[in-house]
Amino acid sequence: MSLVSLNPQDVEASTFSHHLKNWRQRRRMSQLDLALESGVSQRHVSFLESARAKPSRAMILQLSETLNVPLRERNDWLVAAGFAPMFRARPFEDPQMSHVMTAVRMMLRNHEPYPAIAFDRSWNIRLANEPFEKLVAMIGAEVWARIDGAERNLMRLFFHPNGIKPYVMNWKEIAPLLWHRACREAEALGGQEMSALLSELRQYQEVETLGGGRDVALVPVLPLVMEKDGMRMSFFSVIATFGTAQDVTTDELRIECMFPAEATTEQLFQSVGEKGDR
């Protein structure tokens, strides 16, 4: 019988002390900062990070709350310290998710005639209203098949070479902002799937996209401007999250509502909505 040797780095990455130090550094906090914010002594924080002290379940929850660690990763902390996971990841069809999904569908429906979607932390679309589906149809519904993804993913939609870049008129302004927003979220939310997707798509990006945004006019928000077959559309977005989520699926859900940034786009979707009501 052969013995499998464990990589010391993999073993270290699975320890509670590694999780704590990693997330503290992600939040750009010193041990003293974390101690003051959480009400725990700096000495104890130091002992926890060096594995000289073993955390209680309450201590894990207290420190992870202070560091605003996503619920999925809080489960990892608990397991690493020898406790059972606390937060469930319920599927959308779970009966206990019915109120949440009713609220999400209501928000998407109430935003009509303008596009709105619900997506997870990897930017996979989970729900979409009818105006969003019509927007995709205007661009070409086959775009999802062209971008080689098992999921309808927004990052692939924008940054895959067969995606919607040719239709984005202000690409050089908005692409760096979207790319770096995704990078910040991957770091802040700890999403390995998003990090892997960014690594895959990075090879297709121009230096300007990866390097940062260009100087743009001092406007409140930068719109997404698209044009297809002479039809021009301009949107800006508002993103909502659940502030008191106690479920992994709910914690990772984002709702993005697209608003018209100019009168012609507003009139276009108002007219499309009126036709749909007949």
Image: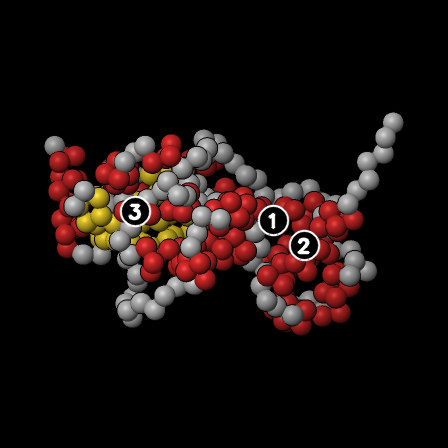
Residue 254 location (% of width, % of height): 42, 48
Tag 1 secondary structure? helix
Query: Which residue does the numbered mark 2 point to in the structure image?
Result: 19
Image quarter of residue 178: bottom left
Mark with earlier residue (2, 1): 2
- Which of the two residues, 45 or 199, is positioned nearer the viewer here? 199
- Which of the two residues, 271 or 6, is positioned nearer the viewer here? 6
Q: Is residue 4 visible?
A: yes
Tag 2 secondary structure? helix
Q: Is residue 181 visible?
A: no
Amino acid type at image mark 3: Pro
Query: Which residue does the numbered mark 1 point to in the structure image?
Result: 73
Query: Which residue does the numbered mark 3 point to in the structure image?
Result: 166
Tag 3 secondary structure? helix
Mark with earlier residue (1, 3): 1
Q: Which is more foreground, mark 3 or mark 2?
A: 3
Image quarter of residue 49: bottom right
Which residue is depicted at the point 32% across and 32% down? 142
Which residue is depicted at the point 54% across and 39% down? 89
Left or right of 227: which side holds 237?
Answer: right
Which residue is depicted at the point 65% across and 58% down? 22
